[in-house]
Image (tube, rainbow, N blue to C red):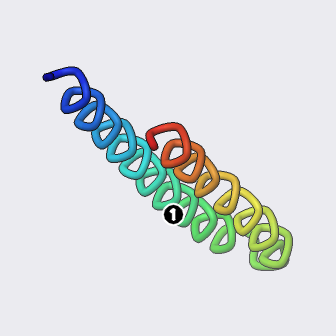
Amino acid sequence: MMTPILAEVAGNIHVAFAAAGAAIGIGLLGAKAAEATGRNPGAAGNVLTISIILAALIEGIVFFAIFLAK
């Protein structure tokens, strides 16, 4: 009787930790991208491109967590 409830709670916690980790990761990515652009404005285009790709990969982790939790 308790097993489905515990499984659902564990899945929700799993997704919450993945979402929190992704949020922290994207925040750090944005901070470091702004710092890199400030140090070398000429590389702003390359930094932006890499940042967008990495942000998409980080968000993909949350989608995997949601898929695995359900």
The picture quadrant where one finds residue 39 is bottom right
Which residue is found at the position 48% from the left and 51% from the top? 22
Which residue is found at the position 35% from the left and 36% from the top? 11
Position of 56 relative to 10 (above/below): below
Toward the left, the furthest residue is 2
Q: In which quarter of the image is the C terminus?
A: top left
Q: Residues within 10 Å of mark 1 (few under 14, many from 20)?
A: few
Toward the front, the furthest residue is 1
Residue 32 shown left or right of residue 28 in the figure: right
Which residue is found at the position 59% from the left and 44% from the top? 64
For the residue pair 25 and 19, the one nearer the viewer reads as 19
Residue 33: percent from the left, percent from the top? Answer: 63, 65
Residue 41: percent from the left, percent from the top? Answer: 75, 78
Position of 24 relative to 48 (above/below): above
Task: Tell me the kind of residue under disc 1.
Answer: Ala
Position of 58 relative to 43 (above/below): above
Residue 40: percent from the left, percent from the top? Answer: 75, 70
Residue 8: percent from the left, percent from the top? Answer: 28, 37
Q: Name the residue under label 1.
A: 31
